[in-house]
Amino acid sequence: MKVSVNFAAVRHTKWYEYALRFFFGGIITALTGLVAHKFGPDIGGLFLAFPAIFPASATLIEKHEKKKKERAGLHGTQRGRVAAGLDAAGAAMGALGLLGFALIVWWALPHFHAMLVLIGATSAWLLTSFSIWYVRKIVR
């Protein structure tokens, strides 16, 4: 699979789909705040690694792919599920990268300058996420 950006897809997204993503992101963030309030910021911070818009994006991707295939006269259910599954795999790779980011910030922030920690943690996130993606690409 080739990674690319399709800006034309923005025109095909309805306003309520953006609202749905915003809603899910807000709900997940609020739930994370409740967890942090009850169990402390160390535990609550772990939940911030959950991709907040993933539930909405997975359903929207499935719907869009299914519609695209149906417009071509094909049954698009399977294609929609595969596309949502690929999105889930990408979200999991990104979440592992965020876990690396969180671990570095948690460990290094008390000992080093904040800007250096954030640069290092961001680099670790990028390296971790890319490495997982690359290994998956080679294995497949």
Image: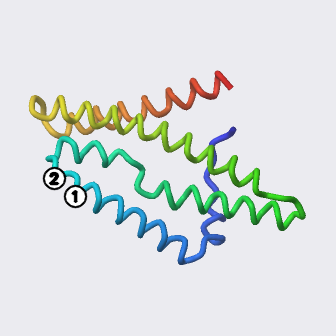
What's the residue type where badge 2 is placed?
A: Lys
Q: Considering the numbered disc 2 on the image, is that residue within a helix, a strand or a loop?
A: helix
The disc at residue 38 is: 2
Tally of numbered tags: 2
Residue sitting nearer the eye, 108 or 81: 81
Q: From the top left corner, tell me how far across and down residue 95 is, in percent.
A: 42, 40
> Please, which residue is most extreme toward the front here?
38
- The residue at which mark 1 appears reads as 34
Q: Quadrant of residue 24?
A: bottom left
Q: What residue lies at 58% left-to-right and 47% top-to-bottom?
A: 87
Q: Is residue 35 left or right of residue 123?
A: left
Q: Quadrant of the N terminus?
A: top right
Quarter placement of the C terminus: top right
Q: Is residue 137 left or right of residue 120?
A: right
Provide residue 97's location: percent of width, then percent of height. 40, 35
Residue found at the far bottom of this picture:
15
The picture places residue 125, in percent across and down from the top left corner, at 38, 35
- Residue at x-position 61% and y-position 70%: 13
Category of crowding for the residue at label 2, using alpha-carbon neighbours closer than 10 angstroms: few (below 14), some (14–19), many (at least 20): few
Residue 121, position as x, y percentages in the image: 29, 34
Say which amino acid is labelled 1: Leu
Q: Secondary structure at mark 1?
A: helix
Closest to the observer, 112 or 98: 98
Instruction: State the CA–CA distance, disc 2 to disc 1.
Output: 6 Å
Residue shown at the point (43%, 29%) measured from the top left: 128
Asked whether the beta carbons under mark 2 and mark 1 sit within 8 Å of each other, the answer is: yes
